[in-house]
Image: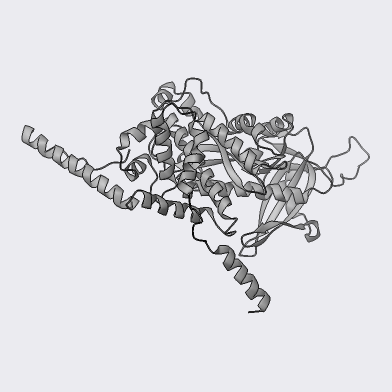
């Protein structure tokens, strides 16, 4: 190995070495972290429940549902179940405080707000908002719930900030079904775009930003793009490859000398892309990433777009990014923006990759803070769990940023594992062992109840196997 590579390898290994005492004092910091959030809760018992629940979300539990978290703390599950699924506490002040902290600690003037729907596969029909709809996790239409999330990305970090539950029309038109799931009476049907705008109007003032980004579900709506323009927001939104566009820079067809001049025809965005030569693509280095410089190729033009059968009344930038895959083919992404400038590609590339970083936020919340591990059916239960999971993720993000001062290569999963080990020491027993003991005691009580029933009625009832809530 050449000397310069050996030196760089030693630097990387040194950056990845975790120093002793890196997380010293982390559990007291968790208590301090929670104070501004739990101040809005109604009682000391609710504040304790919130702390126990978040500790469970950052623990090493295999399933981070209410019952497992209760058993982790060696307590009966009913109290924590009631706190999550039934208790009358409002999650919105906690979300507002989260947005304030994210804006204060990560905020930059050119930050990016990202809207990203995410689905949770569910069985049955009782869970609030569940319906047959597109589930990206499964890659098909299936039974699931869909949440719309607001993320924030800057050069410092990225984090999820707020969320809304999407209620399909089959729910909002069935009042008895909504009542059973605890949906408030004032809740009416709202599209995913309307939910996104509600979050923008609610939290946008707390999050310094210059851009709004989103996937092709967000971008294909001409109404949504128009609403963003009316709010004076700059957007870069993905659109499907079959979006019709009229290139406003391309030369118009030659005039035949009769009648009106023909305009450039509308064509699909992917066909416009296929007509480009190699010289039309510009290579852009976006930023340094974990595996080296993040490089994309991009091309753009000014177009008049036609989405949902409606022709836009304003000129927009069509931006196409391509990245080479392992099989040497190119993956293309198509986006529309209301920003039309002379040299926009470097900025477009930064915003494009910021959107992808918020997708990482969702993966982080699901894998490290139990975002999708809930087993609740009600409106309150879903919102309570989502809110506390985002707080747990934000705490892990803060601890990771704090640790990077000593260990630049530190990751959120590493921090979560170390915190879980500290929690196990604090609770004096491995969490899985604690849960096993608790479940064995519950099964023993069930068997004792069966024997008592036999003594009274001379026959045994069916066995009641342990079931999760």
Pick the residue in front: 238 or 249: 238
Front residue of 384 and 228: 384
Residue 73 located left or right of residue 255: left
Outermost right residue: 257
Residue 92 locus on image (x, y percent): 53, 29
Identify whether 34 is placed above or below 414: above
Q: Residue at x 89, y 38 (%)?
A: 261
Q: Residue at x 65, y 37 (%)?
A: 207
Which of the image's four quarters has the N terminus? bottom right
Image mark count: 0
Residue 130 appears in the rendering: no
Task: Check the image and name the residue furthest to the top.
Answer: 185
Quarter holding residue 225 = top right
Expressed as whole percent of the image width and height from the top left, the position of residue 269 reads 72, 47
Q: Please give left or right for residue 148 compared with residue 54 in the image.
A: right
Position of 452 compared to 129: left or right? left
Q: Position of residue 87 (x, y in %)?
A: 40, 27
Q: Relative to residue 332, is residue 438 depicted above or below?
A: above
Seen from the viewer's position, the closer of residues 298 and 405 is 405
Q: Quadrant of residue 249?
A: top right
**Residue in the image at 10% along x and 36% along y:** 452
**Could you say where residue 146 lies in the image, as x and y percent from the top left?**
50, 37
- Give the color scheme: rainbow, by chain, secondary structure or one colour: one colour
Quarter in which the C terminus is drawn: top left
Q: Can residue 40 be seen by looking at this rendering?
A: yes
């Amino acid at each position: 190995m050449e000397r310069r590579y050996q030196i760089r390898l030693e630097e990387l290994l040194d950056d990845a070495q975790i120093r002793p005492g890196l997380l010293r004092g982390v559990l007291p910091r968790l208590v301090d972290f929670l104070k501004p959030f739990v101040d809005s809760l109604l009682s000391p018992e609710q504040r304790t429940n919130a702390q126990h629940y978040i500790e469970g979300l950052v623990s090493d539990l295999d399933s981070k549902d209410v019952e497992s978290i209760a058993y982790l703390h060696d307590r009966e599950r009913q109290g924590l179940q009631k706190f999550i699924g039934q208790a009358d506490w409002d999650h919105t002040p906690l979300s507002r405080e989260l947005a304030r902290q994210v804006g204060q600690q990560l905020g930059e003037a050119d930050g990016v707000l990202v809207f990203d729907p995410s689905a949770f596969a569910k069985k049955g029909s009782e869970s609030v908002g569940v319906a047959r709809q597109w589930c990206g996790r499964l890659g098909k239409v299936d039974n699931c719930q869909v949440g719309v999330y607001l993320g924030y990305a800057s050069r410092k970090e990225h984090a999820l900030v707020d969320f809304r539950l999407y209620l399909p029309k089959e729910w909002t038109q069935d009042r008895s079904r909504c009542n059973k799931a605890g949906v408030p009476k004032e809740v009416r049907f709202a599209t995913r775009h309307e939910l996104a705008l509600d979050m923008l109007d609610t939290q946008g003032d707390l999050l310094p930003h210059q851009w709004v980004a989103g996937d092709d579900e967000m971008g294909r709506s001409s109404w949504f793009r128009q609403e963003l323009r009316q709010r004076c927001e700059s957007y870069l939104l993905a659109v499907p490859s079959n979006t019709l566009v009229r290139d406003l820079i391309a030369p118009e067809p030659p005039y035949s000398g009769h009648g009106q001049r023909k305009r450039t025809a509308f064509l699909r965005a992917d066909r416009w892309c296929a007509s480009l030569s190699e010289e039309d693509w510009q290579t852009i280095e976006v930023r340094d990433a974990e595996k080296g410089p993040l490089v994309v190729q991009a091309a753009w033009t000014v177009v008049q777009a036609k989405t949902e059968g409606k022709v836009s009344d304003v000129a927009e930038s069509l931006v196409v990014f391509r990245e080479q895959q392992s099989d040497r083919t190119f993956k293309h992404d198509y986006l529309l923006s209301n920003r039309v400038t002379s040299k926009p590609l470097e900025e477009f590339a930064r915003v494009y990759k910021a959107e992808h970083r918020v997708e990482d936020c969702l993966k982080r919340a699901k894998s490290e803070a139990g975002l999708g591990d809930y087993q609740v059916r009600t409106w309150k239960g879903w919102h309570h769990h989502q809110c506390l999971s985002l707080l747990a993720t934000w705490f892990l993000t803060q601890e990771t940023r704090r640790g990077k001062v000593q260990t630049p290569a530190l990751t959120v999963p590493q921090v979560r594992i170390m915190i879980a080990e500290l929690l196990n020491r604090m609770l004096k027993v491995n969490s899985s062992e604690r849960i096993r003991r608790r479940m064995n005691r519950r099964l023993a009580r069930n068997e004792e109840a069966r024997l008592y029933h036999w003594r009274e009625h001379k026959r045994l009832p069916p066995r009641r196997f342990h079931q999760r809530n």
